Structures are given as C-alpha cells and as structure tokens.
Amino acid sequence: MREAYRGTGNVAFIRVAAITPLIHQFDKRQEKARVLLARHRLSQSQLEDPYAVIPLQRFIAFFEDAAQALEDPYFGAKLGSAFKPADIGPLGMLFSLSPTIKDAFERIARFVNSLQNSTSSSFVEDGDACVWTYRIADQSIWPRRQDAEYSLAASCQLVRSNFSSAWKPEEVHFEHDAPADPEVLRRIFRAPVLFRQSSNRMIMRTDDITRVYRSDNKELAAILERHILDLIGETDVGSSLTSKVTTLIEHYLGRRPITIGFLSEELGMNARTLQRQLEREGTSVRTITQAYRRQLAANLLAAGKKTSVAEIAQTLGYADSAVFGRAFKGWTGHAPSRTGK
C-alpha cells in the first residue's frame, strides 16, 4: 500500500517550539527521556533549537509512547491545559495581542504552518457559532490521540490565559474513540466532549468570541507577522530536498530497500533530477543514508535497551550483523558494542 508521501514532494514536519512543554516534562526524568528519544530516533541536540524541525510522524509516536511511559492516558490534555503563549514563541505573542478571541484564532489558522505542516486547521463561522478545527492530514499517522487532546486543550488554555479564565467552548469533538473516563476531559474543557467525530474541533459561540478585550496593536502585530512569515519561508518547515530525503530514509529504513529509484518515485521526480539537486545541496542519497545509519546505530547502542546487534542491523536495513559490523567499524574504527546500562 502506497503511503502518504507519494507525489507530494513534501514531508510532514513539526517545529520544536511547538512541543517545548512536552520536552520540559522530562527534565527530571533524564533516563526515561533518553530511552524514549533513542526509541523514536530523536536526538537531544535536535530538541535544543526551538526553530529546528523534526518529522511529524515520529513526534506523534513519541507523544503516545510518553503517555504510556508516564502511565497517564490523559497526559496530552493535562499538558495542554498548562500551555502558555510563550511556548509557541512569536505565534503565541500574536495570539495574546489580538483584540478578540475570534481575531486570535484567525491568526493562528493563518500562521500555523510556521510550527508544522501537513495539518488541516481552519476557523470558520457557522450561523451563531464559530468552529476551530485541527487535524493531521496524513491518515497513516495513527494513533494520535495525545496530540489531538494536547492541541485542543492548549488552544482552550490560550484563550483562558489571554482573555478570560472563565471561558469555555460550547462543545469539543475528537476523532478518536472515547477514553476510559471521558469525564477527565470534560473537566478540562468545562464542556461536553464527543468522540469518533470527523475531526478534532472546538465549537464556540460567536457572541462570546467577538467581545473586544483590548485595542489592536497593529504595528507590533505587523512585526510579529513578518517574523512568522520569514520563519515559514526560511525552511518551509523542511522544504530542502535533503530534509525530505532524510525523512523518507528514516521512515522506510529497515522496512524496504532504500534506492534512488524508490526515493525519486516517492518524491514524484526523476531519479537523475534527484541526484543533481542533492549534489547542489552538497550531498547524495548514499551520504544521507550513511549519516542516518551511523547516528541511529549510536543511539540504539547507547539506549540501554536489551536489543541485540543483529536486531540493530535489521533496523538499519543491513543484510545481517556481519555487514553492519563492517560498516560500523568503518565509521568508528571499532566493532559495535553497548555503552548503555
């Protein structure tokens, strides 16, 4: 079955700034964080730069795993309920400057791609109500409950922290099944919560969100908007061909052979064009694949998990542990061995 990358020429990313609260939850759980990061092929250095981008599907899987590791099925929603505007940088500041709640959501909808792509977000008027919708466009990224509950709870908290602490939506919808205790979510949102809906959304009364709370600082808003647009244009959230190829390698390595022909087909381009464009960026499929394998091997060997060298070789897409051992020795000068406990 062909996955969602075909012919798009793009790969789903999320900016680290959007997940800062999640990262901070592991500040006092270093060992658990180290194991989870290695498991999902994320490095600590990636998470230190708020403007860096990481593959969206890997973040979603990490989020789901984190909830299990912390033994809290409502982890995402609780995390979102403590969200602050500063957690999303200039976009959060722009939200907090908005004169009305309606203006704030319209701005979020316009600039959400500064934080992540491959997301369907909209804010529309529907009679006497307005609807804020959030949904990951790639259907292959599943389960994604934690991200959905986190995103809507964070949106709700942004309103409460910037406009009115007593504010509540009329209704909240989620695309996933109901959890064991839906009342937890109803308490967080202070509203009815429905499940197995067509999308994740908050329904708000128009007269509640059009009340003016402050005058509009148009000059500062314009500066912030320009900065956010620069962020979108700077990398287009992973628009370089090297970024796209790297993500495809990360996604498929160990599952199917990584060849120029396969990658070019996934990206909807000619194989020779792919080679030439990578050369212009100073790299090649072979270089990207080797760099990724080397980093992943180091992460897995240091993770402290009881995974054999043979299993690591399979994960990296090698025929057997002997082939992996020769490659690893070529990178480091010594045979692969564990550094974790």
Image (cartoon, helix red, strand yellow):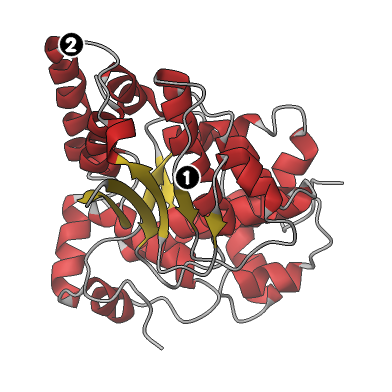
Q: Give whichever of 102, 35 is nearer the camera.
A: 102
Q: Percent from the top left, x then y, of residue 190?
A: 57, 40
Tell whether 219 sits left or right of 213.
left
Task: Measure the C-alpha gap from mark 2 to mark 1.
Answer: 26 Å
Furthest toward the bottom, the residue is 1
Q: Nearer the viewer, residue 170 or 26?
A: 170
**Amino acid type of disc 1?**
Leu
Foreground pick, 167 / 152: 167
Within 10 angstroms of label 2, few (less than 14), some, or many (20 or more) residues?
few
At 79% from the left and 65% from the top, the residue drawn is 307
Question: As rendered, which of 194 and 236 lies closer to the eye?
Answer: 194
Q: Is residue 65 visible?
A: yes
Depicted 300 relative to depicted 324: above or below:
above
Residue placed under numbered mark 1 in the picture? 152
Residue 40 in view in this figure: no
Q: Residues within 10 Å of mark 1 (few under 14, many from 20)?
A: many
Amino acid type at circle 2 is Asn
Q: Relative to 279, is 147 on the left or the right?
A: right
Q: Considering the image in quadrants, where does the N terminus appear?
A: bottom left
Name the residue: 28% across, 81% down.
261
